[in-house]
Amino acid sequence: MKEHELFPSPGASKNRKRVGRGDASGHGNYSGRGYKGQKARAGGRVRPGFEGGQNPLIKKLPQKRGFHNPFRVEYDVVNIGDLKVFDSGAVVDADSLVSARLLKSASRPFKILGGGELDRALTVKAVAFSAEAKAKIEAAGGKTEVA
């Protein structure tokens, strides 16, 4: 096959519609735009979402309003009471929490919250602690480390 023998597949290419070239062309007179109205005018079109002056749908839906902070950090949370599965003196970090099935993934940041009670000394390494959680861990004889 030579370069001059190449041609497009059937139906792959179509002729351009030439409008406004007389009635015999089939696209004369109004050039496929119909009779009068906003869409028949040059540059005449409505913006996306315009509903003819009726209150548009986007203004009726309140749930997309307000400010969304793109820098917000979403924490997975673990309560103090859930740490009873660890023995006294254990080091609690992301990997140990995943193996204990208290977290789904070790790659996501997690925060220790103060729900429940702790009766054993643990060394807890987390991204963040609540003030109550920090106080309860240290009251039980443990340590907190921000990882």
Image (tube, rainbow, N blue to C red):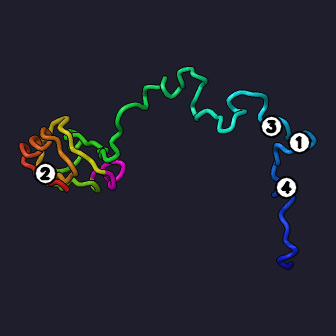
Element under disc 1: loop
Q: Residues within 10 Å of mark 4 (few under 14, many from 20)?
A: few
**Which of labels 1 and 2 is toward the front?**
1
Residue at disc 2, secondary structure: strand
Q: Earlier in the sequence, mark 1 or mark 4?
A: 4
Question: Badges 4 and 3: C-beta atoms under 8 Å apart?
Answer: no
Magenta stretch secondary structure, dominant: loop
Residue 59 to residue 10: above or below = above
Q: Is residue 58 above or below residue 131?
A: above
User: Which of 30/81 is in front?
Assistant: 30
What whole-number distance in Å separates the C-alpha atoms at marks 2 and 3? Answer: 74 Å
Badge nearest the viewer, 4 or 3: 3
What residue sits right under mark 2 in the picture?
144
Q: Earlier in the sequence, mark 2 or mark 3?
A: 3
Label 3 SS: loop
Residue 71: percent from left, percent from top: 31, 47
List the residue tagged with mark 3: 32
Span colored in magenta: 97-108
Vertical comparison of 8 with 5: above or below = above
Residue 103 painted magenta? yes
Q: Which residue is disc 1 drawn over?
A: 22
Per the image, label 4 sits on a secondary structure element best described as loop
Sooner in the amino-acid sequence: mark 3 or mark 1: 1
Q: Which mark is residue 11?
A: 4
Of callouts 1 and 2, the N-terminal one:
1
